[in-house]
């Protein structure tokens, strides 16, 4: 069985070290990101596309919380926090508004308990991943299943649409509209239509220097960056939607 990729956000360095060390002894997961600050963590999650987020809720010295971070990504999340009782409403809202698995445990470090919780949590994650696959028909190819969370952007050109991914080469879909993709499994609240030709994955895009910026894999397998200037009348809306 391929281990699930885990990203860890924890503001206490010693606890983070112990947590990562413990996770590395569990064969069903592999740690791909571990950070103490939300800004760096968010950037690295966009780059690595983990399967599970392990998040501290209260982040010392930050206005951002682990709940805020979880709201950005359409990913299963396991909260670890000594103050989770103060955030139960936010956790409950996250569970109500989203389909991905959400669980929380205390922050007292207990490797045995962590392992036991992951044994129960991982099957839920795998079932969720199955539901996230959407069927598409690339031009000149057989139908395939793709995960919308891996699509960085969709670009319309000459009646066709190119799907650019964060982790693999693009595919071409012929004679379909943005509305078709939304009606067939692409979550409307996770993609933002920019102008007439772009649909951006909100969790993989950020707003900086008056531009929308998205990383993606090009035809030759190389990573590229798409930068789109945002009109003045759209900047407030987009700034509120896309986290830097």
Image: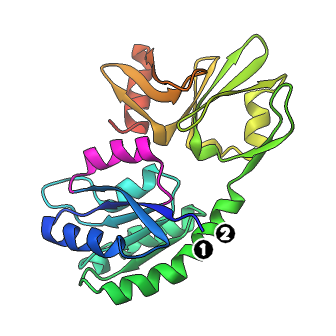
Q: From what the image shows, is residue 55 above or below residue 177?
A: below
23 left or right, relative to 224: left
Residue 216 location (% of width, % of height): 51, 29
Q: Nearer the viewer, residue 98 or 128?
A: 128
Q: Residue drawn at (57%, 61%), measured in percent from left and top? A: 98
Q: Which residue is mark 1?
A: 124
Q: Residue drawn at (79%, 43%), measured in percent from left and top? A: 144
Q: Nearer the viewer, residue 176 or 5?
A: 5
Residue 68 location (% of width, % of height): 36, 55
Hey, which quadrant is residue 201 in on the image?
A: top right
| Colour option used | rainbow
Q: Which residues are magenta?
A: 36-51
Q: From what the image shows, is residue 15 above or below residue 98?
A: below
Image quarter in which the C terminus is found: top left
Image quarter in which the N terminus is found: bottom right
Q: Nearer the viewer, residue 217 or 176?
A: 217
Q: Is residue 155 magenta?
A: no
Q: Residue furthest top?
A: 158
- For label 1, the SS is helix
User: Is residue 184 at least partly visible in the picture?
Assistant: no
Work out how far the residue at label 2 is from the one at label 1, CA to CA, in angstroms. Answer: 5 Å
Residue 86 location (% of width, % of height): 28, 76
62 left or right, relative to 125: left
Q: Residue drawn at (15%, 66%), measured in percent from left and top? A: 12
97 left or right, relative to 128: left
Q: Which mark is residue 127?
A: 2
Residue 162 location (% of width, % of height): 68, 23
Cβ atoms at labels 2 and 1 below 8 Å apart: yes
User: Is residue 33 at least partly visible in the picture?
Assistant: yes
Principal secondary structure, stretch drawn in magenta: helix
């Amino acid at each position: 069985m391929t281990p699930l990729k885990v990203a860890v956000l924890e503001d206490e360095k010693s606890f983070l070290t112990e947590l990562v060390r413990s996770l590395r002894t569990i064969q069903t997961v592999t740690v791909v990101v571990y950070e103490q600050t939300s800004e760096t963590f968010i950037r690295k999650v966009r780059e690595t596309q983990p399967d599970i987020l392990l998040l501290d809720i209260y982040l010392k010295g930050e206005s951002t919380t682990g709940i805020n971070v979880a709201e950005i990504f359409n990913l299963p999340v396991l909260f670890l926090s000594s103050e989770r009782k103060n955030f139960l409403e936010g956790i409950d809202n996250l569970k109500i508004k989203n389909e991905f698995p959400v669980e929380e445990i205390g922050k007292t470090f207990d490797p045995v308990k962590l392992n036991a919780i992951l044994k129960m949590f991982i099957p839920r994650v795998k079932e969720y991943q199955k539901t996230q696959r959407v069927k598409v028909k690339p031009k000149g190819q057989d139908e395939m299943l793709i995960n919308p969370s891996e699509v960085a952007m969709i670009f319309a050109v000459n009646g066709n649409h190119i799907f650019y991914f964060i982790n693999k080469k693009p595919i071409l879909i012929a004679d379909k509209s943005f509305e078709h993709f939304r009606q067939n499994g692409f979550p409307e609240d996770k993609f933002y239509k920019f102008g007439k030709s772009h649909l951006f994955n909100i969790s993989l895009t950020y707003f900086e220097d008056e531009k929308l910026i998205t990383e993606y894999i090009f035809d030759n397998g190389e990573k590229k960056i798409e930068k789109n200037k945002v009109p003045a009348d759209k900047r407030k809306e987009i700034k509120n939607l896309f986290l830097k």
